[in-house]
Image (cartoon, rainbow, N blue to C red):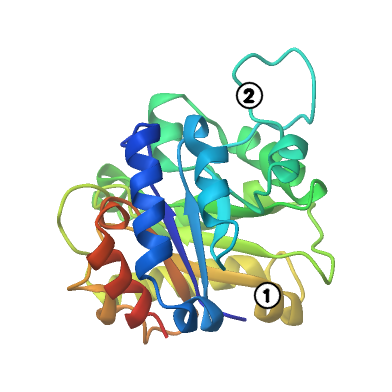
Amino acid sequence: MKKVIIANWKMNLGFRDSMKLATELAKQVPEIELGSKEVIICPSASSLLLVAEILKEHLFGLGVQDIFWEDQGAFTGGESPKFIYEAGCRYAIIGHSERRQYLAETDEMVHQKTKAALAAGVTPILCVGETFEERSRNLTDNVLMSQAIKALSGIDLLPNEQLVVAYEPVWVIGSGRSLDPSEAQHAFRIIYQALLDLFPLHVVNNNIRIIYGGSVDGVNASEFVGLEHFGGFLIGGASLRVEEFISIIKQTK
């Protein structure tokens, strides 16, 4: 499988700045890089269609930062998996730590969203990761296993379906601190083992990518690309800076 680099713009850009950034990426990211790996842009919902229009002639993929677990109905503010698929999105970030923290998103909600995404033809980007308190109590392994299993239990991946699992140590995100690659390696192995408890080996190896997200930038990205089970990056702040984001793309092999 190709490595995947996912830009999560979060709630940082209005529609004008989103269009400007999308235009710069379309101009500056070499087509050869987009052909050898997947680059997914996840703008805010208000800018989604505008960004999609700018990127439609290029090889970027499009994703959303969250979805709901129903396709249609009286769910004010929800993003329908069916509708975002119709809008051209093929990826959805699910269970990001910021939604778990600020919007009380539970493991059961993450599970329902993951199922709904797959049913709509959307690849889930499932986020798992420990808080600083959990890390301090040596609970990282338990948290990663629990979040992965609760999100994915009872789900079968069809041959044409993909899943991305993003390890995001919550205590690192947005801090400017960098996780030691050896810790990321350990987390990857824990996640890989959890996946093996849920899916056949060939499905884990052929349909699922494990990626890293946590204060990744153009300086430290190279430290993670050689890790066992490494499948790419989920990029936050650095994805808003064109040159730095391009540097990460080029380093991802």
Q: Which mark is residue 78?
A: 2
3, 226: nearer the viewer: 3
Which corner quadrant holds the N terminus? bottom right
In the drawing, does residue 109 fall left or right of residue 98? right
Q: Earlier in the sequence, mark 1 or mark 2?
A: 2
Task: Find residue 107 and report its image quarter.
Answer: top right
Q: Please, what is the three-letter code of the amino acid marked with disc 1?
A: Val
251, 24: nearer the viewer: 24
For residue 188, say whether it is visible. Answer: yes
Q: Residue shown at 64%/47% (left/top)?
A: 151
In the drawing, does residue 5 fall left or right of residue 72? left
Q: Nearer the viewer, mark 1 or mark 2?
A: 2
For residue 146, say whether it is visible. Answer: no
Contact (Cβ within 8 Å) of mark 1 with mark 2 = no
- Which residue bears the numbered disc 1? 204
Q: Where 31 falls versus 175 (above or below)?
A: below
Q: Residue shown at 23%/47% (left/top)?
A: 174
Q: Residue shown at 45%/80% (left/top)?
A: 33
Task: Find residue 156 and report its image quarter.
Answer: bottom right
23, 239: nearer the viewer: 23
Q: Please, what is the three-letter code of the amino acid marked with disc 2?
A: Gly
Is label 2 in a helix, a strand or a loop? loop
Is label 1 in a helix, a strand or a loop? helix
